[in-house]
Image (tube, rainbow, N blue to C red):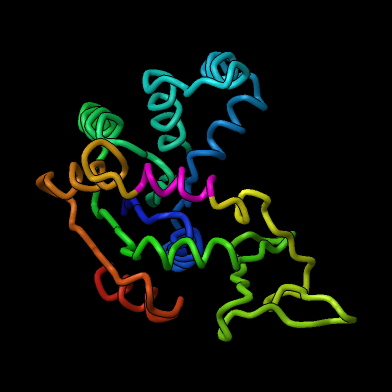
Amino acid sequence: MNILTFGPNGSGKGTQGAIIKQKYNIAHIESGAIFRKNIGEGTELGLKAKEFIDKGDLVPDDITIPMILNRLKEDDCENGWLLDGFPRNKVQAETLAKALKDEGMDLDYVLEIVLDRDIAKLRIMGRRLCVNDNNHPNHIAFDAIKPVEKEGKLVCRVCGGDLLTRPDDQDEEAINKRHNIYYDDTTGTMAAVAVFKSLEGPKVISVDGTSSIGEVSEAIMKELP
């Protein structure tokens, strides 16, 4: 079972990806991790990507997409995969769709977590990251997933680990920049979603991201086999 997942920063798609991974025993693949792995291992594609990253430039799609395809062919993807964080724009979506077809890789589901931009921003600014597992949900504004207090400080509600605040989570300009890309339905990520929704074959699952983690997960599971 192969799944492509979309959702703005703050929608909880990472958390839902972890839940799907555990239930269906498929690989949860984040595009950022692919870059780090290739660069860290000094692969040919990784070295090429590093040249662009070191200059502050975007890595071209003719480097990024082969990296992704190589990752999707690894042994842990035998049962399927869930790709998170790519594509981010319409051109990338069109290129990835063609590459998957050329490689004979079926895309079974397109998962979209729908969330209002203002709510997504609030969620980002209030979230706290567990040092043990970033997918442990902690948020200072939502009672259901509030961190717990221990010895005068807030710790992870799941494992009791220390919590961190990403600097860019408190940077409204950075948040707006990320969301400007995602919510752009002409050339950005929303346009990429539309590309995959238009394809014959994959089933589209759109869920309301304003619900609780459990409710969102339940809505997704109802659509998966």
Relative side of 14 to 200, left or right: right
| One can see residue 165 in this view | yes
Q: Is residue 50 above or below residue 94?
A: above
- At horizontal 55% and vertical 52% (from top left) the residue drawn is 172
Q: Quadrant of residue 101?
A: top left
**Residue positioned most to the right:** 151
- Main SS category, magenta section: helix
- At horizontal 39% and vertical 40% (from top left) the residue drawn is 86
**Residue positioned most to the bottom:** 143
- At horizontal 59% and vertical 79% (from top left) the residue drawn is 145
Relative side of 82 to 185, left or right: right
Residue 182 placed where, x, y %?
36, 47
Q: Is residue 121 above or below residue 141?
A: above
Q: Can residue 106 be found in the magenta stretch?
A: no
Residue 122 placed where, x, y %?
50, 67
Q: Is residue 75 above or below residue 95?
A: below
- At horizontal 83% and vertical 76% (from top left) the residue drawn is 153
Q: Nearer the viewer, residue 212 or 158?
A: 212
Q: Nearer the viewer, residue 45 or 70?
A: 45
Q: Nearer the viewer, residue 116 or 128?
A: 116
| Magenta residue span | 173-182
Residue 185 placed where, x, y %?
23, 45
Residue 44 placed where, x, y %?
55, 14
Relative side of 56 to 211, left or right: right
Q: Quadrant of the N terminus?
A: bottom left
| One can see residue 22 in this view | no
